[in-house]
């Protein structure tokens, strides 16, 4: 099983931390970075190889991750010469990728079962499978329902729950074929393009723990609560397996 980790962003939302560190290397707790946790989880889930797509401060990511032997995963790199968004780096990897693979942002903190997501994608026959998590938005106003300029309903400060993308995907190599090498493309545009072509992506609905560390609020929560979260994110079997390797 192979994973592509998107680790090339500038992490502007996490400034000033990302002035000196790429976002995947910002510390979580006392002993880990986000990338360290992700690679531990992938190794524990049975992944044997990963490609790190790097750009901003990529030399630091290379120095940290090396060839992946620390985690028992073979790591190679794809370095962008210009910003290619989140899907664009994959176009130059087409000949190096297996038929199906995992793609994920390098700032995701979750206990999602990556292997099950990839297996589910393989079985779905879809061009793309999007891992989703529920998020609730609270409206801080009274919301009116209108008909013909009359108020026919009123809800005080309602809450709406949506399914949002977690930044983790199962993908098929054939999905990349229509796009040109060097084209900048994000997952938002890819999903809309697939919908327009009636090649509808599948979803992998997840109800467990998930934080987007690119958001300062989520990063603060991760550091504040990491002592409680460590056994969830890095359960003993995962730590033992990685240490044994």
Image (tube, rainbow, N blue to C red):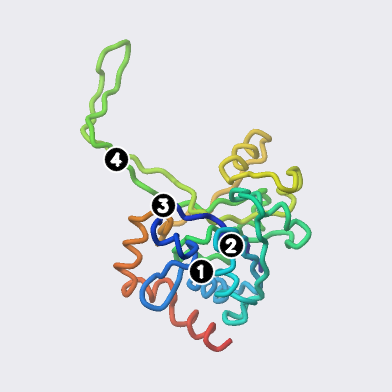
The residue that mark 3 highlights is 13
Q: Residue at x 58, y 46 (%)?
A: 187
The residue that mark 4 highlights is 159
Between tags 4 and 2, which lies in front?
2
Residue 133 seen in the figure: yes
The reply, left or right, for residue 222 in relation to residue 188 is: left
Give residue 24's position: percent from left, percent from top: 49, 64
Mark closer to the chain start, 2 or 3:
2
Mark closer to the chain start, 4 or 2:
2
Between tags 3 and 4, which lies in front?
3
Mark closer to the chain start, 3 or 4:
3
Q: Residue at x 33, y 55 (%)?
A: 217
Quadrant, the N terminus: bottom right
Q: Secondary structure at mark 1?
A: helix
Q: Classify residue 7 by image quadrant.
A: bottom right
Label 3 vs label 4: CA separation?
26 Å
The residue that mark 2 highlights is 5
The residue that mark 1 highlights is 35
Compared with 154, 92 (above or below) is below
Give residue 186's position: percent from left, percent from top: 59, 45
Q: Secondary structure at mark 4?
A: strand
Compared with 182, 71 (above or below) is below
Mark closer to the chain start, 3 or 1:
3
Give residue 198's position: percent from left, percent from top: 66, 36
Label 4 vs label 2: CA separation?
33 Å
Q: Residue furthest top?
A: 148
Q: Secondary structure at mark 2?
A: strand
Q: Secondary structure at mark 3?
A: helix
């Amino acid at each position: 099983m192979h994973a592509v980790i998107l680790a090339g962003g500038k992490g502007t939302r996490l400034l000033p931390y990302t002035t000196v560190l790429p976002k995947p290397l910002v510390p979580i707790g006392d002993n880990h970075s986000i990338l360290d946790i992700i690679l531990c989880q992938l190794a524990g889930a049975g992944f044997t190889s990963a490609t790190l797509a790097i750009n901003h401060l990529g030399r630091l990511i290379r120095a940290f991750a090396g060839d992946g032997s620390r985690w028992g995963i073979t790591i190679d790199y794809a370095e962008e010469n210009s910003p290619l968004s989140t899907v664009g780096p994959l176009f130059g990897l087409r000949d190096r990728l297996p038929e199906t693979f995992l793609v994920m942002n390098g700032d995701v903190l979750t206990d999602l079962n990556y292997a099950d997501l990839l297996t589910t994608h393989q079985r779905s026959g879809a061009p793309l499978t999007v891992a989703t998590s529920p998020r609730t938005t609270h409206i801080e106003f009274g919301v009116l329902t209108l008909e013909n300029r009359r108020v026919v309903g009123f809800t005080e400060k309602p809450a709406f729950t949506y399914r949002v993308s977690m930044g983790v995907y199962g993908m098929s190599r054939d999905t990349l074929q229509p796009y040109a090498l060097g084209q900048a493309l994000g997952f938002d545009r890819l999903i809309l393009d697939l919908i327009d072509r009636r090649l509808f992506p599948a979803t992998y609905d997840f109800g467990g723990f998930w934080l987007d560390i690119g958001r300062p609020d989520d990063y603060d929560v991760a550091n504040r609560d990491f002592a409680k979260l460590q056994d969830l994110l890095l359960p003993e079997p995962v730590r033992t397996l990685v240490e044994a390797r």
